[in-house]
Structure formats: C-alpha cells, structure tokens
C-alpha cells in the first residue's frame, strides 16, 4: 500500500510540474521595433537610389523626386502609433496564480476521483480479503434466503451445505445437508461430503453415521477417491490394517504415478502392511482403463490428502488438494481425465463456475460418458437453477448413450415436471423404477414423485408395472 501511494504521489508531482512549468516562465522580451525596421528598409532603398544615380541609370531629377517620395513614406511609417493600454500588470489572474491553483486542486481532485470511482481497499491485502469474504457471505446469505422462500430445492440445499462447510459453519451445514433429503442418499459425492462434516464435528472420528455414509457412497461408486481415503483411515484407526491396505491400494490405482499424493498413499500403505504383518508390496501403478471401468472410473474424482489428517478435511486441506491438481492440469492441459477430476473437486467445493470450465476442457471424454454428461449437466443446472437449455441437452445426450441411466432419467423427469409435461415426467421416472432395488427408500421416493405427477397431469393414480 505504501509503495502504491508513493508511486501515485510521484506521478502526480511529475504531471503538475509539466503543466505548471510554462505558467511560471517570465514573459518574453519585446520584439524588434517596427519603426526601426521600417527606417532600415528605407535606408537600404535610398542607398540603392544613390547607386543608380551614380551609374547613370536614372536622371538627377528622377532621383530627387524618388528620394522625396521615400522620405515622405518613411515619415508616415515611422510615425509613433497611438499608445496601447496594457492590462497584464493590473490583472489579478496571473500565470503564477493559475499555477498555484493547479498545484492545490490537481492532487485534491485526483484523490477525490480515486476515492469515488476507484477501489482503495484493493491495495490493502487484508481489506481485499475481507471484501472477498464479505462478497462470499452475501452470496451464501442470498442463497439461504432463496431456499427459505422455496425450500423444495434439494440441489440448492446441498450447495448451501457445502458453502457452510467451507466457511466453517458446521452446525448450519449439517442442517442444510438434512434438508437436501434423499438427494444426499443417491449422490456419492454428497454422502462423502456429509460424512466428512460429521467426522469433523465428532473430533475427526470416522465412525457411526459418518462411516455408514462413506460405505454407502462406495457401494454406489467403488472408486470414489475421497470415500476410499476416509474408509482406509477409519479401518486403520480401529486397527483393521488389512482393510486399510485394501482401501488405499484401490485408491492408489486412481492416482497419477509418482505424484505427491501417490507417494503419500504408498507410504501409508507400507506402514499399514508393516503393522498388519503383511509383506511389503511392489509399487502399484495405474492400470489401463478397461471397457467395464469406463472413462468415468478412469477419470476418478477428488485427490486425497495425508490419511493422518483425512478425517479432519478442513477447508484449507481441501483447497491445497485442489490447488495441486489445478497446477498439474495447467502443466498437462491434454490430460482429459485430470480435468474431470478437477471439475469434480471444484463441484465438491461449490466452485461451480470453475467446475463448468474444467468439464468443458475435458472435451471428448465428457461427450462419450453418460456419467460425466450428467455430472456436467448437474453443475449447469445448479448454476442456472433450472434443467433447460444446455443442461437438458447434456441429459438427453447421456440418455442416448444409456437410456436407463438413473440420474439422467431423474433429471429429465424433473425438467419435464417443471414445464408441466407430467406425462413425460412419469415416463422418465417409471424407467428409473426399473433400475432401483424394489422397496428401497429411493424407489419409494420415486413412486411418490410419480403419484404426484399423475395427479397433476390427470393420468390416474396407478403407475405402470
């Protein structure tokens, strides 16, 4: 801040000096007298006349007449003019006064304009950070107000819960996760995020409800990195070292070989193997993606952190993980799976604009995988608070690749429901029922949604078998 002020003062002084300098110069001396100039001209003409007479060019009579004429003209041209009244000596507004006013008004005007139109807080790091925090707080409070007015928005509650979690407002984050309802129970990302919050509130203890959520997330996505990390830490802390080794060795296959995260996980695996009495394992490398695994499995999700601190998962730790991944992607922009991992990480953090850009950079990898298409669509829909336009196009593309993709069907049904196309919503949701376990909480929720849509669309109360 001091350097900025010094530079601004120096530039102001230089500009003032450049402007004021001409005003302080003394008035130039009077020019050549017109009377003397005219007399000199006529003398030259008389000399020329005398030379012409001497050479016999003109007669003495002509010379005399011409001399008389020149003398008369000289008298006329050298007659003293009427005196001119000079007012400069009596005027109050002088160059020095103008310079003094510029010296006073220019710095005041510059400072006033900067204070009015500029951002003085931007040159103060502490003030800038506070301004960013205040802006983030306003955005979160605005989202909370919208959800209070329209509470039937699970995706909005999930976003608010993540925002509260990053801000360290854990009580409010837990309440928001609860209000997200069944959305948490069907989304492994939200399950792990909620489990992490519960672990933090339980003094970094991944047990009970927290571990239940982690295990459920892994049952949906067995290669969820953050879920594998937390499951391994929980097993390690209860002395189930073999279970920790199994979880972390699976995790290692998802990481970039030789990366800091992979090296840390290898160290933890070696420690767990030693405590379990298992032989040291060879270094695990990432396998080649198989058709069964699919691009989404190869892309992975969020890179892990040190397992000794994984249970805490503070916002600072999450930011460090994401920053490392973002730095690697800048150095390797052609790593499409890496962009997917970064997009997922941003999505978990609630940085949806960054997540959208990362998904876009994943390019063809997203376009060929229905899981990634629905994840990308979810980001866009959350940002726009509607499943229309680009989000719906991505959902339809996912359904073209996999007509029974549960998440895509649910999103397509929700979009149809919101535009009052209840028959189409029922058609999509009834397809979802065919891929859900009968009698499960998810199936019951979908059946309730179908019943509501049938009533509003006048389609009858019985769902199709």
Image (cartoon, rainbow, N blue to C red):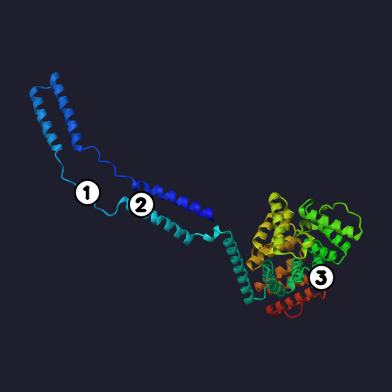
Q: Residue at 21% of width from left, 38% of height from top? A: 33
Question: Callout 1: 10 Å neighbours few (<14), some, many (20+)?
Answer: few
Which of the marked residues, 2 or 3, is nearer the chain's N terminus? Answer: 2
Give percent across and percent down for residue 58: 12, 22
Element under disc 2:
helix
Task: Give the left or right position of residue 66, taking residue 370 as reference.
Answer: left
Kindly check if marks 2 and 3 are in contact, taking CB atoms under 8 A apart as contact. no
| Disc number placed over residue 238 in the picture, else none | none
Relative to 415, say whether 334 is above or below: above
Relative to 70, say whether 429 is above or below: below
Image quadrant where residue 236 sits: bottom right
| Disc number placed over residue 99 in the picture, else none | 2
Furthest residue to the left?
A: 61
Image quadrant where residue 461 sits: bottom right
Distance of label 1 from label 2 (alpha carbons): 22 Å
Which of the marked residues, 1 or 2, is nearer the chain's N terminus? Answer: 1
Which of the marked residues, 1 or 3, is nearer the chain's N terminus? Answer: 1
* Nearer the observer, 121 or 432: 121
Distance of label 2 from label 3 (alpha carbons): 77 Å
Relative to 80, say whether 277 is above or below: below
* Nearer the observer, 256 or 98: 98
Element under disc 1:
loop
* Nearer the observer, 213 or 339: 213
Image quadrant holding the N terminus, namely: bottom right
Give percent across and percent down for residue 203: 76, 70
Task: Give the left or right position of residue 415, taking residue 280 as reference.
Answer: left
Task: Give the left or right position of residue 362, taking residue 51 as reference.
Answer: right
Give percent across and percent down for residue 84: 19, 47
Kindly check if marks 1 and 3 are in contact, taking CB atoms under 8 A apart as contact. no
Do we see residue 367 in this rendering? no
| Disc number placed over residue 207 in the picture, else none | 3
| Disc number placed over residue 86 in the picture, else none | 1
């Amino acid at each position: 801040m001091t350097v900025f002020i010094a530079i601004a003062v120096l530039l102001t002084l230089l500009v003032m000096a450049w402007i004021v300098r001409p005003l302080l110069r003394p008035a130039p001396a009077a020019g050549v007298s017109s009377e003397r100039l005219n007399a000199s001209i006529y003398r030259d003409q008389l000399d020329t006349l005398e030379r012409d007479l001497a050479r016999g060019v003109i007669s003495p009579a002509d010379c005399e007449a011409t001399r008389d004429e020149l003398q008369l003209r000289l008298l006329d041209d050298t007659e003293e003019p009427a005196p001119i009244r000079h007012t400069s000596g009596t005027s109050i507004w002088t160059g020095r006064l103008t310079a003094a006013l510029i010296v006073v008004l220019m710095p005041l005007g510059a400072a006033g304009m900067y204070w009015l139109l500029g951002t003085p807080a931007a040159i103060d790091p502490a003030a800038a950070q506070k301004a960013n925090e205040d802006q983030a707080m306003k955005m979160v409070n605005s989202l909370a107000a919208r959800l209070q007015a329209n509470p039937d928005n699970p995706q909005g509650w999930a976003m608010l819960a993540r925002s509260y979690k990053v801000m360290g407002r854990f009580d409010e984050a837990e309440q928001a996760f609860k209000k997200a309802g069944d959305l948490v129970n069907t989304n492994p990302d939200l399950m792990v995020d909620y489990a992490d919050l519960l672990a933090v509130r339980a003094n970094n203890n991944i047990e009970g409800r927290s571990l239940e959520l982690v295990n459920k997330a892994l049952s949906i996505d067995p290669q969820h990195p953050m879920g594998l990390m937390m499951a391994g830490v929980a097993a390690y802390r209860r002395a189930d070292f073999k279970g920790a080794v199994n979880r972390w060795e699976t995790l290692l296959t998802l990481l970039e070989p030789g990366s800091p995260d992979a090296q840390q996980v290898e160290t933890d695996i070696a420690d767990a193997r030693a405590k379990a009495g298992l032989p040291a394992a060879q270094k695990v490398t990432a396998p080649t993606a198989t058709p069964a695994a699919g691009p989404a499995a190869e892309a992975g999700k969020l890179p892990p952190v040190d397992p000794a601190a994984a249970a805490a998962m503070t916002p600072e730790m999450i930011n460090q993980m994401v920053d490392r991944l973002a730095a690697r992607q800048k150095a390797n922009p052609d790593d499409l799976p890496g962009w997917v991992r970064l997009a997922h990480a941003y999505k978990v953090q609630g940085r949806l604009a960054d997540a959208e850009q990362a998904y876009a950079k994943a390019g063809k990898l997203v376009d060929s995988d229905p899981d990634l298409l629905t994840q990308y669509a979810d980001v866009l829909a959350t940002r726009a608070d509607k499943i229309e336009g680009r989000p719906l196009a991505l959902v339809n593309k996912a359904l073209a690749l996999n007509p029974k993709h549960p998440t895509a069907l649910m999103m397509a049904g929700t979009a149809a429901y919101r535009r009052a196309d209840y028959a189409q919503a029922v058609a999509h949701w009834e397809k979802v029922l065919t891929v859900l376990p009968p009698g499960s909480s998810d199936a019951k929720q979908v059946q309730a949604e179908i019943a509501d849509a049938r009533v509003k669309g006048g389609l009858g109360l019985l769902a199709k078998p």
